[in-house]
Image (tube, rainbow, N blue to C red):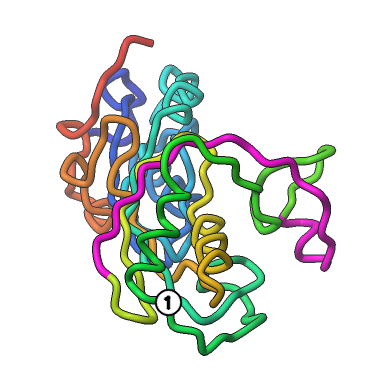
């Protein structure tokens, strides 16, 4: 692909397998350098510690479709660590509490029943959600906590493996679900505390990991993304 030619063939939807320790912004920057197209967005961010499907939208005709993709259901493989809580509800946070309580498999299976179907979830303070024009994480970093209204979400959780202190679960969910909140709430229900220690997005809408190109391939100047671009009616 001629990177200097901003043709319609350079525009499209590109599913990328984001790696751990890469920000969503960095992924956008990599694509801007490769395509020389400034208007690039994505259909849902992932935290730096998380990996998996990022649906990248290249070119204004596709970034205009972002809401359509953002509204799509997602699916994740999550690892939850029991026995500790953190202020961010995930592995990047500061440890707040510890517990020696070890839930049984039966306890865990019973607790997971509460995370099926339509549920109410309170957005975490460490999130980009805005209340009163302020992003919650900006307030959280100042040590402030404000009331947040519960938000309805739809969940389908499947236990994959449990060997204390780690739980591995598969989660199919609706837009706006916070997996780290699920981890925190599950730990509270089990009476031992928990935080999200690893996360992979395995599906975003209709795009799965098998549809993605590797993030590392974007660093190769000779790699042509054109055959991997998906087109949509704009």
User: In the current view of this chain or complex, which residue is farthest to the bottom?
Assistant: 100
Q: Position of residue 53 (x, y in %)?
A: 32, 46
Please say whether residue 42 is visible from this viewpoint.
no
Judging depth in this view, the residue of 110 and 173 nearest the camera is 110
* 11 versus 179 height, above or below: above
Indicate left or right for 177 with 110 as reference.
Answer: right
Judging depth in this view, the residue of 1 and 30 nearest the camera is 30
* 33 versus 20 height, above or below: above
Q: Position of residue 180 (x, y in %)?
A: 52, 59
Residue 30 included in the magenta stretch of the image: no
* 161 versus 53 height, above or below: below
Q: Position of residue 214 (x, y in %)?
A: 22, 53
Judging depth in this view, the residue of 197 and 29 nearest the camera is 197
Judging depth in this view, the residue of 229 and 6 nearest the camera is 229
Considering the numbered disc 1 on the image, is that residue within a helix, a strand or a loop?
loop
Q: Residue at x 37, y 76 (%)?
A: 104
Q: Give the labeled residue for mark 1.
A: 103
Query: What count of labels does the image hold?
Result: 1
Tell me the magenta residue range.
137-161
In the rendered image, which quarter is residue 55 located in?
A: top left
Q: Residue at x 28, y 48 (%)?
A: 202
Q: Quadrant of the N terminus?
A: top left
Please say whether residue 35 is visible from this viewpoint.
yes
């Amino acid at each position: 692909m001629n990177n200097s030619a901003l043709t319609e063939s350079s525009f499209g939807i590109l599913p990328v397998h984001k790696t751990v320790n890469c920000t969503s912004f960095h992924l956008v920057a990599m694509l801007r350098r490769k395509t020389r197209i400034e208007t690039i967005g994505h259909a849902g961010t992932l935290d730096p510690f998380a990996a998996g499907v990022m649906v990248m939208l290249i070119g204004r005709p596709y970034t205009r479709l972002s809401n359509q993709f953002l509204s799509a259901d997602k699916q994740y493989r999550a690892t939850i660590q029991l026995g500790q809580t953190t202020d961010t509800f995930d592995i990047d946070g500061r440890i707040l509490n510890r517990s020696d309580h070890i839930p049984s498999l039966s306890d865990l299976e019973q607790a997971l029943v509460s995370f099926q179907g339509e549920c109410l979830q309170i957005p975490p303070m460490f999130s980009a959600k805005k209340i009163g024009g302020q992003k919650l994480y900006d307030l959280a970093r100042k040590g402030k906590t404000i009331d947040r209204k519960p938000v309805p979400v739809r969940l389908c959780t499947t236990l994959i493996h449990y060997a204390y202190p780690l739980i591995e679960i598969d989660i199919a969910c609706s837009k706006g679900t916070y997996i780290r909140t699920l981890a925190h709430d599950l730990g509270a229900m089990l009476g031992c505390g928990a935080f999200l220690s690893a996360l992979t997005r395995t599906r975003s809408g209709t795009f799965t990991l098998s549809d993605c190109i590797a993030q590392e391939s974007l660093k190769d100047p000779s790699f042509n993304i054109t055959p991997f671009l998906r087109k949509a009616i704009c």
